[in-house]
Image: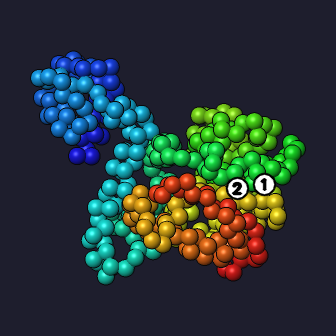
Amino acid sequence: PHSTLLVAIDFDLFSTLSSGPTHLSALASATGASSALLQRLLRHLAATSVVLETGPDTFAPTALTQLLTDPRHAAALHYSDALPTPVLAVLPRFLADTDYRDPCDQRHGPFQHAMRTDKSPWDWARGRRDLAGVFALHMSGYHAKQGSWMDAGFYPVAERLVAGCREGDGEVLLVDVGGGLGHDLEEFREKHGELVRGRRMVLQDLGVMVKGARELRPWVEAQAHDFFGEQGVKGARAYLLHSVLHDWQDEAAVRILSNLREAMQPGYSKVLVYEHVIPEKGASWKSTSLDLTMMGTASKERTEAQWREVVDAAGLRISGIWTQEPGSESLIEVVTQRTSKL
């Protein structure tokens, strides 16, 4: 069970086991857990191929064991235990009680039913500072094993982003809006350092995240910012929204995009939306499972038609969509069009 992995992570069982085959008594001594408890846990972990049973009460690591020593994957399990798992557990009852309507009210949805709160998921999360770092670490791990829009052969960074970018002390190449601890900016700097040298990149998020980003990455130019307010960086070459808009229903997504539109310079600035684009037919289970997870907070993944509707309502237009493989995130390039419809 999921809980078995969490228990093992919490007392460093996988890290202790990572050196090679180890007897139960040595594991008990190293972790401080009782031999009786360890024996029961390890039997199950061996039965499910998380660890390898090499002899009586002797266990060795597997590739999965090594993976679970990565703090990012451990954070994913802790985040799942704190939020998606309890929310999805009440989803069947919630849908039955609401006559099987698609959840769309982010203040009266499955999340509130599970957590027994009248707060939105985001207001609730602000009161759980312990989850902020866990969530940011989880997101960095979630994206680490996937292809990135910054990779060669995905989105043409040099041609469509860096080319034509103004130079000068005040010029900003990229603003990562809602960028957490700055993992995307660090990746961008690592992969395109020769193209961005001398140009500014700005990280924006809520105050608690900005503080963590500055501690983790002292080089980052970080700003406390609420994307429902005015965008303070005007006329940047690009504004990145990575896994931001899927957290919100259409009206809120339009507000976020509209605030960026007001800061954009027509004909120069772009918004780069990095999100899943669910195909009209033959969707990948990766995208659909994420969409059902988002249902728990009354939010959603979108099809291309739904993306175009939201972007158009914000007075913007989609100038291109780049997708590397089914079930992965797509890069949606957005430019100015006209005044907002809303």
Identified by mark 1, the residue type is Ala
Q: Position of residue 48 (x, y in %)?
A: 21, 40
Residue 263 occupies quadrant: bottom right
Disc 2 marks which residue?
Answer: 239
- Assess whether mark 2 and mark 1 are in contact (beta carbons under 8 angstroms): yes
Q: Element type at marker 1?
A: loop
Name the residue nearer the viewer: 281 or 50. Answer: 281
- Look at the picture and state if 285 lies above or below 311: above
Q: Residue at x 60, y 76 (%)?
A: 309
Disc 1 marks which residue?
Answer: 236
Question: Residues under labels 1 and 2: Cα distance?
Answer: 7 Å
Q: Element type at marker 2?
A: strand
Q: Residue at x 32, y 62 (%)?
A: 88
Name the residue nearer the viewer: 37 or 131. Answer: 37
Residue 99 occupies quadrant: bottom left
Give left or right: position of 340 versus 60: right
Name the residue nearer the viewer: 157 or 263. Answer: 157
Identified by mark 2, the residue type is Tyr
Q: Residue at x 65, y 77 (%)?
A: 313
Residue 43 occupies quadrant: top left
